[in-house]
Amino acid sequence: MAIITVREALNSAFKEEMRDDPTVITLGCDIGVRGGPFGITLDLMKLYGKDRVIDTPISESSFVGAGIGAAATGLRPVVEVLYSDWITLGMDQLVNMAAKMRYMFGGKVNLPLVVRAPFGSGGGIAAQHSQSFEAWFNHVPGFKIVAPIEPYDVKGMLKEAIRDDNPVIYFEHKRSYAVEGEVPDGAEGESYTVPFGKAAVRREGTDVTIIAYSMMALRAKEAAEQLASEGVSCEVIDLRSLLPLDYETVMESIAKTNRVVVCQEANLRGGLAGDIVAEIIDRGFDLLDAPPVRVGALNVPTPYNKGLEELCIPGTENIKAAVKRALSDE
Amino acid sequence: MNGEKAMQVIREAIPCLTDRLEAPKGLPLEKQVDMFRKMCLAREFDTKVRTLWMEGAIYGLAHSYVGAEAIAVGACAALEDGDLITSTHRGHGHTLAKGADIKAMMAELHGKYEGLNRGKGGSMHIADVDIGMLGATGIVGSGMPIALGSALSAKVLNNGKVTVCFHGDGGTNQGVWHESINMAAAWDLPAIFLIENNQYAIATEIGWVAKETNLYKRAIGYGIEGVQIDGFDIFKVYKAVKAAAAKARSGGGPTLIEARFVRLLGHFVADDQWYRDMEKAELFWMVEPIVRMKDYFIKNGLLKAEEVDQIQAEAIAEIADAIHYAQNMCSEPPESILYDDIYANGEIIV
């Protein structure tokens, strides 16, 4: 095993897939010569040339759409949207083309497209650079959505996304690039992938199930560790894949704990957590000993000021409070 | 309106109107006849679609390609088999011209399981990717990035394929239009952006929303060649696309072609066009593409009037067959296919 960062995990996944499959290309702003604003695509242009690693103009609507057109005609494009906030510009092409072309065409086309979308909040980048839009894509039939956080999953799921024949929205947390974790080295490190639709139980517990993904999965682990010292036993599930979503693992855990907290970093209203809670109620209302509790950002645009920003973004303390609420009999 | 006054109105709308059709050198008569046959099929297809829609046999929305046949047929005749096209909401003519099965097209419009898209697309999403027809689309201008991506594939895969992006004057005012042409030009991609300038976006005249209505001039801004041609003249379309395709294939990058004409019928099949000056609108039937090609064959002694009539009669019969097939020999899609093809490889995520 080797210890690598999320940044290195993404970069090595790219390098291996582009080396092994000449139809893999990547396009986005500043990803070639500069290697991407976050250094994710470093050296790719040197290795695979300007035809396959393309510096685009600032034209998200059309370069996202170009990814779709290229996917329909024999390539496996990975499109980078510099900050996921600007995926709004490509939304028409994603929602009205990528998500439904195969269906509208009666199955006559495959769209092996990956859209990499750095999301998440923190660091004072304010309202237009801090958003998390995964719920929007969950609402539209036709996408797969993943949001891994551990380097092992980050690498294995990017490779899986590139090999998948469907449009995949790949959310990577923009403050996770230096997060470290174990990844197999050598041949095993190059060959493994992480299948979609399987959650990972990060910590076993008996009192409350905490469901989270991306940065909130790390926060949930912290919360569970701290609560353990107070005598509360939490089971932490890192969803990794949001669509498909592993309700089997979720419901197995709830059958054991009978209490659940669902966490997201996005604004709470209309979010994935609400959708997950609804599904849990549909599948196993009788398993619950207490109302499910949701954790999410306050329903305000992310403010610039550090103090105000901290008030909005959910963290370890919010999760701990939610667990306590789930355990109270109020 | 007298003849001279009428021609003045027509020339004002279509300054590039040609006096007479002239076949490109070396284009065999057999191919010219095939082009005529395809135009007749496209005309009859959409003429009948309108009737069928009025009768309630065709569900949803349908937009007629009547009057624009020279553009789809002329352009597709100038392409190679492996080349690709993107279409608009008005896509029957493009699909037919690219060579799709007409019976399957008609079945699709009837929502049948045997339809080109299993009855899931209908008129506005008709597609046949296997023959390089990348789909009609209900969002105006949205084929531009798809064509850009298709041309990008051709460059990366180095497969020599050219992509023609058909779109209307309405599409030219979308942001993606500018972005896509800019990128295709910057990277010398093998794309042809073909504006079907029928001068109407539903009821909005192009001159109300664009200062410069000679849309080909926009090419200058992107550093590519722009040409304006008579969109009612099939040979002009053929020649322009042939030249643009040769240029694209040899690495010369994209061309912007403005095929200028005037919409002959309503925006969609039941649009009565109360907003237009109908006396003027009717004049353009004098220069519509099928009449002009018919005259060309007869006046040049290439075909006898009876032979031309025979081709038209055969087209009418073929469309009647297609309607018979769609209405009597096809089935309703079973409920069991509802979730099929949201995802590839048989995967179902509920």
Image: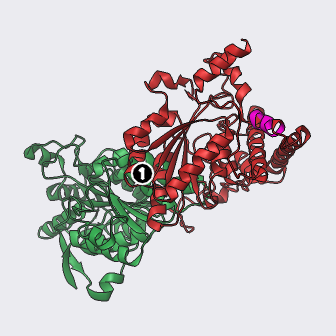
User: Where does the image place residue B349, in percent across and percent down from the top left?
Assistant: 50, 62
Residue type, mark 1 in image: Ala
Single out the residue that lies furthest toward the right: B306
Is A43 displayed left or right of B86 in the figure?
left
Q: Which residues are magenta?
A: B291-298
Nearest the camera: A81 or A148?
A81
Vertical position of residue A7 compared to residue B182: above or below:
below
Residue at 36% across / 83% down in the picture? Answer: A191
> In the rendered image, what is the letter of the chain coloured green?
A
User: Where does the image place residue A162, in percent across and percent down from the top left?
Assistant: 40, 69
Residue position marked by numbered label 1 in the rendering: B184
Vertical position of residue B103 compared to residue A19: above or below:
above
Asked if the stretch drawn in magenta spans residue B144, the answer is no
> In the rendered image, what is the letter of the chain coloured red?
B
Residue at 49% across / 62% down in the picture? Answer: B154
Q: Please identify the dominant SS of the magenta region.
A: helix
Quadrant housing the N terminus of chain A: bottom left
Element on which disc 1 rests: helix
Single out the residue that lies furthest toward the bottom: A187
Is A134 displayed left or right of B226 in the figure?
left
Single out the residue that lies furthest toward the top: B1
Is A257 displayed left or right of B114 in the figure?
left
Is A285 displayed left or right of B52 in the figure?
left
User: Where does the image place residue B301, in percent across and percent down from the top left?
Assistant: 85, 40
Estimate how packed mark 1 is, as few (under 14), some (14 to 19) or many (20 or more) residues with alpha carbons within 10 Å: many
User: Where does the image place residue B80, in percent across and percent down from the top left?
Assistant: 63, 59
